[in-house]
Amino acid sequence: MKPWTTLGPIAQWLPAGAVLSPDAPDSIPRSALDYLEVYSEVVIGGPADAVDDIRGHRFEFAHGWRELSAHTPNDTVTRFVLPGALASHQQATHRIAGVVKGEAFVNLMKDLFNGIA
């Protein structure tokens, strides 16, 4: 079963560290790696409107501490940090992040994986 058919809009998925009920679907990403894997699956085999939605995202990878911030076109942010860290608080006094635009992410996934599925 594909995640985008069971969860609705991507923006509603929960970040790691969220309290999930024991019967929550396994398709809800529990970590940044799971989150990126689901997005990759959507790019490769998902509906065109979901792929277009991902094109409008921005992914920030923080240097100096482990954090992924996914910014959506409607200005919501999903942050993944290490267990025990507060996603709403900066982990150091100075933050530097590398940014990957959604368009580049979509193009990379298509270049790497189209034809494999």
Image (cartoon, rainbow, N blue to C red):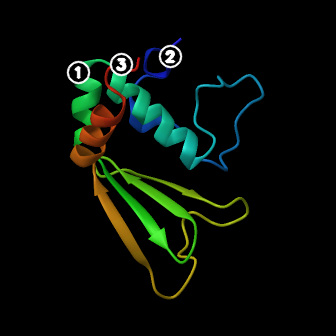
Residue 80 location, quadrant: bottom right
Residue appearing at x 53%, y 63% in the figure? 67
Kindly identify the amino acid type of the residue bearing the numbered disc 3.
Gly
* Residue 112 in the image, given as x and y percentages of width and height: 34, 35
Rounded to the nearest whole Å, what is the CA distance between mark 2 and mark 3?
Answer: 14 Å
Instruction: Classify mark 2: helix, strand or loop.
Output: helix
Is 89 positioned to the left or the right of 5 in the image? Answer: right
Kindly identify the amino acid type of the residue bearing the numbered disc 1.
Ala
Taking 33 as reference, is 110 above or below it?
above
* Residue 110 in the image, given as x and y percentages of width and height: 28, 32
Q: Which residue is mark 3?
A: 45
* Residue 100 in the image, given as x and y percentages of width and height: 31, 56
Is 55 positioned to the left or the right of 95 in the image? Answer: left
Numbered badge on residue 48? 1
- Closer to us: mark 2 or mark 1? 1
Tell which residue pokes out farthest to the top in this image: 1
Q: Which residue is mark 2?
A: 6
* Residue 84 in the image, given as x and y percentages of width and height: 73, 63
- Closer to us: mark 2 or mark 3? 3
Taking 12 as reference, is 73 above or below it?
below
Residue 56 location, quadrant: top left
Taking 18 as reference, is 96 above or below it?
below
Kindly identify the amino acid type of the residue bearing the numbered disc 2.
Thr
